[in-house]
Image: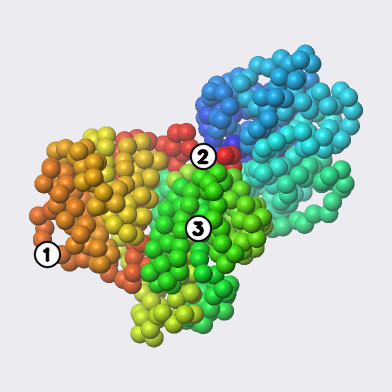
Amino acid sequence: MCGIVGYVGKDNDGLKKLIDGLEKLEYRGYDSSGVAYFQNENIKIIKEKGKISNLYNEINFAEKTNLGIGHTRWATHGKADKENAHPHMIGKFAIVHNGIVENYTTLKKELMKKGYSFKSETDSEVICALLDYLYKKDNNILNCIEKLNEILKGSYALGILCSDEPNYLFAVKKNSPLIIGIGDDSNFIASDVPAILDKTKKYVVLEDGDYAKIKMDKLEIYNNGKIKKYDVKDFGFDSKMIDKQGYEHFMLKEIYEQPEVFRKTTNPYLETGFDSLFNKMPDFSKYRKIRIIACGSAMHAGLVGKQMLERFANVKTEVETASEFRYNKLFLEPDELVIVVSQSGETADTLEALKIAKKNGNDTLGIINEKGSTIAREAKIVLYTEAGKEVAVATTKAYSAQVAMLSLIALNIANFNNFISKKEKVEILEDAKKLPNYMEGLLQKNEVYKEVANVIKDYNDVFFIGRGIDYALAMEGSLKLKEISYTHSEAYPAGELKHGTISLIEDKTPVIAITTDKNVASKTISNIKEVKSRGAEVIYITNSDYEDDTFYDKKIIIPKINDIFTPLLTVIPLQMIAYELAKIKGCNIDKPKNLAKSVTVE
């Protein structure tokens, strides 16, 4: 989850390029940051605790360098302080690292016996010492990196400088993302696109086990000791997509982009009606069961997808958290499709779950936003969401795009099996056209969301309740509130509150209740009345015109639309309430504490 940049080029403004890149990667970690660069044929290191602005203040940009590496850290091994910050340097080597080395404790003990001492608590410094040890035995960097790949266990993306090679930048990739940007008289490394998007549109994706020797005008990539061919690709978007474009926060911008994201994601499959849905999607008819595996909001999107797949397509569907799936006893069936959902396409636990499913012989489908990502390359089938670049750590538009894609899969299967009438098909296509306008209408209710945020701002606990698909949405609403406003919240199936948790409901305890599924609305309303009778402050989100107004304090109306699309409307008030509450509380909305955008470690 850390951010890595590197630069080697003709221009001597390397420090500026490194800092620019790190600032664009700060969403990947902001516990500390640092740079290592060549200065008078020596490697100089500057690093600071906290945000990149702290590092910026320590750098003399008048210093000239054309070769360096940089890092912004999300702490895993050791506390967030200057000693544990990257880059680390031992002997002739300075490195930056993203990932986790699983056997670092054993390696550290062995290296200490050989005379090495360590200043930090990190696994990363152990890599640096190991590289130095190998280099002393074999004065060939590429041989040492190949040996490093054989010894290290876990995940790592590395940027490496060697004082014996003042013209070269080295890079290594294993289970953590790393790309090489190809410029004019310059080359770059980065753990994500934003770091280099304003510098070059051409890039190379490193595969697992790849390592690279990079000069300003030359690139060599190796794997298993042999040089390999590589493809230079072009980024499909520009730097404007990672600008706020007048919005106060990236998160707000991305919430407001959801109507257009829905259009871009669904139009290719609905442009000529259900025929294009059938022709442009895979054949799902051979699968009797679907298993959705994901983490965080993507898993919540999967829970919405489960409801759609079972209700509309009549396909048994299970949803599992990727980090748990890896260690559970598996009951994967031969005719079972495994769907993995990930915005970044690099989520470590989800990627490992994908590999397990492939090894078991199951077909795999990736719902991914990042083209060329590891999961996109590993999955047998890929369906891309068209959310564009999402910068805010808390996902909004990528989540909605995932829900939209899962809904399309449900419609595809339902159509194939003739579960949808001609009349309903017409209604669904009409509603797909209306949906972006309905979303935009909900986005205009800012004052309502501010009022709700002001109601709950002084309380430490908030509850979200719903049944079925509304419970799945409640989970995402609760997560958003926790992520960006640091307010403790819990989502519960509405009927479960009285089985223990209702004891926590006191006078004015905020409860956000959702009823959009008419089949269970009356039951949920009974549960809402139970919490209201105990003094709860109820915020009611619904698409019904239920006449009784005694069981809630504030009501947010969702436009009525076909059930397949209703979740895409319901989530907008949940996102906006979380945003407005975080704004009132003065939180760092785009970069919540302790979180990072792309979770590339287990």
Q: In this image, 379 relative to 432: left or right?
A: right
**Where 352 falls versus 303 (above or below)?**
above
Q: CA distance from mark 1 to mark 3?
A: 38 Å
Q: Earlier in the sequence, mark 3 or mark 2?
A: 3
**Where 163 falls versus 382 (above or below)?**
above
Residue 266 disc label: none
Could you say where residue 119 lies in the image, as x and y percent from the top left? Answer: 65, 16
Could you say where residue 272 lies in the image, as x and y percent from the top left? Answer: 50, 82
For label 3, the SS is: strand
**Where 361 falls versus 102 (above or below)?**
below
* Foreground disc of the pair 1, 3: 3
Q: In this image, 219 relative to 575: left or right?
A: right
Circles 3 and 2: CB distance less than 8 Å?
no
Could you say where residue 425 lies in the image, as x and y percent from the top left? Answer: 40, 81
Q: Residue furthest bottom?
A: 422
Which amino acid is tagged 2?
Answer: Ala
* Foreground disc of the pair 3, 2: 3
Q: In this image, 395 relative to 173: left or right?
A: left
Residue 292 disc label: 3
Q: Which residue is mark 1?
A: 547
Examine the rendering and report whether any part of residue 427 can be seen: yes
Q: Which residue is mark 2?
A: 596
Q: In front here: 275 or 150?
A: 150
Q: CA distance from mark 1 to mark 2?
A: 44 Å
Q: In this image, 472 relative to 54: left or right?
A: left
For label 2, the SS is: loop
Give the residue drawn at x 24%, y 67%.
518
